[in-house]
Image (tube, helix red, strand yellow):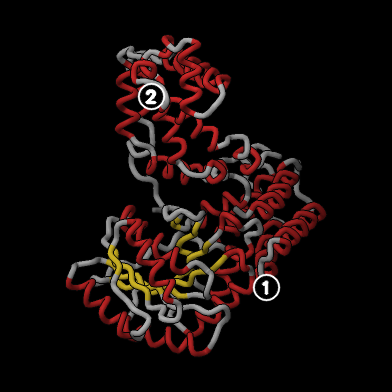
Amino acid sequence: MFANLTSRLKDVTDRVRGRGRLTDVNIQESIRDVRRALIEADVAVPVVRDFVARVQARAVGTEINRSLTPGQAFVGILNEELITELGGDASPLNLRQQPPVVILMIGLQGGGKTTSSGKLALYLKEHLQRRPLLVSVDTRRPAAMLQLERIASQIGVGCAPATPEETPADIARRAVDLARRQQYDVLIVDTAGRTRLEADLLVELQSLSAQLSPAETLFVLDSMAGQDAVNAARAFADALPLSGIVLTKTDGDARGGAALSARAVTGRPIKFIGTGEKLTALEAFVPERMASRILGMGDVVGLVEEIGKKVDREQAERLARKVGKGHGFDLGDLRDQLQQMLGLGGLDGLLARLPLPGGMSADKLAGQVDPKAIRRQIGIINSMTLSERRFPKSINGSRRLRIAAGAGVGVPEVNRLLKQHEQMQKMMKRFSKGGLQRALRNLPGSGPRFPGR
């Protein structure tokens, strides 16, 4: 995510940190580097101009805190101004209305409205314990209606019936009535789009907005479309009571210009970002954390929360009790850990939240871990008998041949897995009785929630 922008700004901050003091000359050099990085990231020129002017005004003649080096102070200014540019405080959804609370999803065709509608429904269901209902009023693209029905079925939420022969107004009216009768908390309305902005589309959306009085009108913005999408968002914001932005496809956006331009150009906050193709890949947008990630300083709080949501704590505690009682760490336990690793999703997304040393990139590190290799290891363990999983030392040469054939791999891969398990087993034995349980008490989910969600 935003790899080019992060790389360029990290180069600037690394150089500044190494300086003993800031002078007018090296401040100007750093400011030029920041300006160049933002322009290459396709940030809107007026936004670049205003941002650079604010950083320069604060950096020139700033009084340095004695506990900081001048370089650290400059990085701090850059971080604070990035947070301001991205919106300052997080902007949660407004759900404090009489149900069903209506959320209108708008935007250009191809921006990801339908998928984002499904992602948002799943987010509301899993994170906010709401009962959402989806409906498509895109009568021009019947495939959108079918797509939304399939997504609703996948994530286990309701989807109001709709046909292309009806008008958007009639579909919306029936969906609101259905949501009230069946006690849905939130109604998410997926609207029609165009490949470009057209007057009749705005008229249709204005009519729907007047009919539904939505609590939230969210513009779905394709971050990879750059400034064209940002300019379209501004036109929608001028025509409709836009309340926020959902920034999609950020996992494929190396530049980051749309993220930095969207709020400034539209005057509306970014509320969510789509970070992948999976329906779970939607994050609440927190400017402070995003600024930290853009500057290459990671988002450890976000990482801890993400792992806390996905790690099976009951399974981890069972393993802790088992190891604590001296029962050992068998191959079945190793398989469970490998499956949890796959369940955490893309390793590159997790690494992107860590403050990596200079020169290291999340993409490069993630490339060294092959998810296919993890699946092969799981397949090898699945080819073993229950007894072999519990007692790996019983696996002799002939058994290794049978296991390799069953998993479709070579014997050397089976040997590597057994060696890996042996090393992990030795590590587990180092935990004293109760030590692993104490460590697990510090896992995410065991303490108070972090702010910002």
Q: Can residue 63 be seen in this view?
A: no
Left-right relation of 66 to 272: right
Identify the amino acid type marked 2.
Asp
In the drawing, what numbered circle is on residue 379? Answer: none
- The one of 422 and 69 positioned closer to us in this rendering: 422
Tag 1–tag 2 contact (CB < 8 Å): no
Residue drawn at 51 percent across, 57 percent down: 287
Identify the amino acid type marked 1.
Pro
Disc tally is: 2
Residue 346, image x and y in percent? Answer: 52, 44
Residue 69, image x and y in percent? Answer: 68, 42
Identify the image quadrant of residue 333: top left
- The one of 84 and 356 positioned closer to us in this rendering: 356
State the residue position of label 1. 46
Left-right relation of 278 to 77: left
Residue 397, image x and y in percent? Answer: 50, 11
State the residue position of label 2. 333
Of the numbered discs 1 and 2, the one sitting upstream in the chain is 1
Residue drawn at 31 percent across, 28 percent down: 317
Q: Is residue 338 above or below residue 394?
A: below
Tag 1 secondary structure: helix
Residue 60, image x and y in percent? Answer: 72, 58
- The one of 352 and 32 positioned closer to us in this rendering: 352
